[in-house]
Amino acid sequence: KSFKRAHNFNAGPAALPLAALQKAQEELLDFNGTGMSVMELSHRSKDYEAVHNRAIGLLKELLAIPENYDVLFLQGGASLQFAMVPLNFLPAGKKAGYVMTGSWSEKAYAEAEKLGEVFVAASAKEGNYRRIPATEELKYGSDAAYLHITSNNTIFGTQWQDFPDTGDVPMIADMSSDILSRPFDVSKFGLIYAGAQKNLGPAGVTVVIIRHDLLDQANKKVPTMLKYGTYAKDNSLYNTPPTFSIYMVKLMLEWVKEQGGVAAIYKRNQEKAALIYETIDASNGFYVGHAQPDARSLMNVTFRLANEELEKKFLDTAKKSGFVGLNGHRSVGGCRASIYNAVPYESCAALRDLMVSFRKENG
Ligand code: PLP
């Protein structure tokens, strides 16, 4: 049955590449001639193991992950990482620094605070998280357990443009909403985590990239399933992993590779974001971006209109025209277009057209 794909600007779970969904559909009932769906395979079978290892291998290749890092598949979302990071890496007598750039950093900080000593290394809270602190603003000692950052702030629409060098202090990043959207130097980080449901695949799996020396230093007295070492030791097959989600991650990564890899995806993401930011900037204040221009996210474009009534009218008009997910997060209001890797250029162009025509009619 034919259907029209929605212009999907959801913040997560979010759009997936049509090609990956079609491949999943094609293979749904009979994976690789097994007479079974991927969902029905044993996680100990050769067929599943090949999927699992291919997903890991592709992520390593696409992000140029150095040899001394492991890629792990976990569950519990990025939210469980907020607790797992301090459980494993914040020993008594040490302090961990958090850079506050939005609601997700606050949540990460709040979890760590329950488990050990934490401090704010820098904050952009003043002015409601419109910017990313400059490297010079980051205050932490060389004895800090780690420095935690949120590379992209899904709710406020800001993004680190480049990452600091933290020397011997391991930098730990929540990259849930921008992993795989642009090339970056993995070796600057001790640990990276990301819920898959924005740029990597469907909900249900969390990806962790972890440097071996951190694994060695980790707290040993942590419950098995909360210990990174458990996943590293058994190639994330200590217990049953979310096999179907990992399979979808594999399909998504194959799609990224077919697009020309992360560099090509980045170029397209810049073009997509430019369509919308340029419309905001050319609107004479009709649309007002939330983020400072030098902190703008390529993944989540946040903006407001003159008042809530006009915002509601805009969102209603968008909804009627087949646009999904443009409401800002409930804590911020306004509008937000999440334009992750799988959101087509055409959807961004359609949004631009909608913004232009709405302004003409209501400006
Ligand atoms: N961190 C960031 C930056 C996010 O955008 C989100 C979800 O939107 C989370 C953490 C929470 O992720 P999860 O729902 O997978 O726990």
Image (cartoon, rainbow, N blue to C red):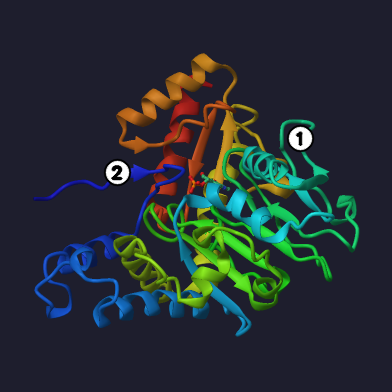
Q: What amino acid does circle 1 point to?
A: Lys
| Of the image marks 2 and 1, the number of the one nearer the N terminus | 2
Instruction: Say which mark, if any, is on residue 61.
Output: none
Return the residue nearer the eye: 77 or 65.
77
Question: Which residue shows up at 49% across the image and 41% down it?
Answer: 337
Check the image and name the residue furthest to the front: 221
Q: Secondary structure at mark 2?
A: loop
Return the residue nearer the eye: 360 or 351.
351
Instruction: Confirm whether residue 333 shows in the render.
Output: yes
- Residue beneath label 2, please? 6
Instruction: Confirm whether residue 180 shows in the render.
Output: no
Q: Position of residue 321 (x, y in %)?
A: 31, 33
Quadrant, the C terminus:
top right
- Residue beneath label 1, please? 125
Q: Is residue 185 above or below residue 350?
A: below
Q: Position of residue 174 (x, y in %)?
A: 61, 55
